Image (cartoon, rainbow, N blue to C red):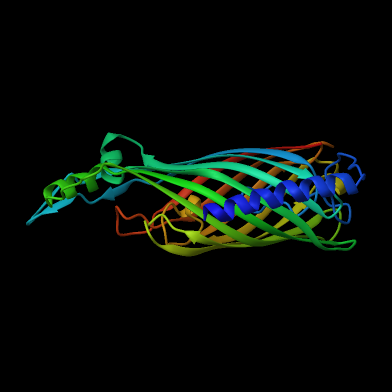
Amino acid sequence: MKKLLYLFIILLISWTNAFAQKDSLIHDGKIPSINDHVFPTSTYLRSSFIVTNLQAEMGFGTTSKLKLPGITIGDYELFAFEGKILFVDLGIQYQQRFTSWLAFYASFKMAGRLGSDFSTIVADGVNTISGAELGWLFRIKQTKKLNLSGTVSLYNLKGNFINVSQFIEEVLANNPYPSVVKHVPSMMVGLGLRGAYGFSPTFGLQMQFDYAYGESFERGSTQGFFSAGILGDVDFNPKWDIPIGLGVGYSISTAPEIVMNDGGFTNMFLLNLGYTGAKDFKLGAQYTYYNVELKSIEDKPFINKILLTLQFYF
């Protein structure tokens, strides 16, 4: 996978120099639109437009109170707790437009899961997944109402898992090398499709599909990951002079930075609220309701998460 990374970087530098010299077009810096419709910013559905921009996002979520089983020794269960699990997201992405049909993007992301107090930290551990994504965004088709783009991406992630209960289980099982901390790297390549459709200046629709394949967070194994989503929105600014956009959507994903494990999937219900009155930036808030599979409990708990997004266009 390292050879693949080196090849990707060489192609990136070569293509960047070539397209930067051949294309002298300059984007006007305004927020892109289709059929005069401005689309809201979404954390899980990326923009399909070939523009230069900078996006930063931060999210925080929590489960309802859960009962976490402890360690079973014989007929007894030790260290069983009740508490909440917290979820945290941080991310930043820069996208550079080179031609009217090609852009390069680089992003850094961090997702974390931990208990809300000492008892749930002991039971469920502290888990973080962080890393970078490099990719190309290229235009496939553009009409008056439709913008369709594809992506080619490379992911370099690292999982850090601190699990106290698993460490105790390994000690009790006489494991000669018990470990409370595990660091697992992962590298993947991916392809994607992004689209936006403007029905009118007021109504619009966005969609996205991504598939990545590479190293999983189980040592020595590979796995495929996918995500897909759709988001419909209404912009109240063109017709009613209210600079507010509202979106409702659905997404399904097995991406490890979202589900925080390998092999599981989640259904996400999205509600977006954004400011649409500016010419060179977008500000949005997204409420997400979704479920994930946790190894520390039998059920798939639901999470309520709020994500804030700020996007500048140059």
Q: In this rendering, is residue 178 above or below 256? A: above
Lateral position of residue 95 relative to residue 107, left or right: right
Residue at screen point 76% across, 53% down: 234
Report the quarter where the C terminus lies. top right
Q: Percent x, y for residue 242?
A: 81, 41
Question: Going by the picture, which residue comes out furthest to the left?
Answer: 74
Residue 32 in view here: no
Residue 217 in view here: yes
Lateral position of residue 241 relative to residue 180, left or right: right
Residue at screen point 67% across, 58% down: 152
Lateral position of residue 217 relative to residue 208, left or right: left
Q: Percent x, y for residue 259?
A: 46, 54
Residue at screen point 83% across, 55% down: 101
Q: Percent x, y for residue 96?
A: 76, 43
| Nearer to me, 190 or 249 | 190
Q: Quadrant of residue 179?
A: top left
Q: In this rendering, is residue 294 above or below 131? A: below
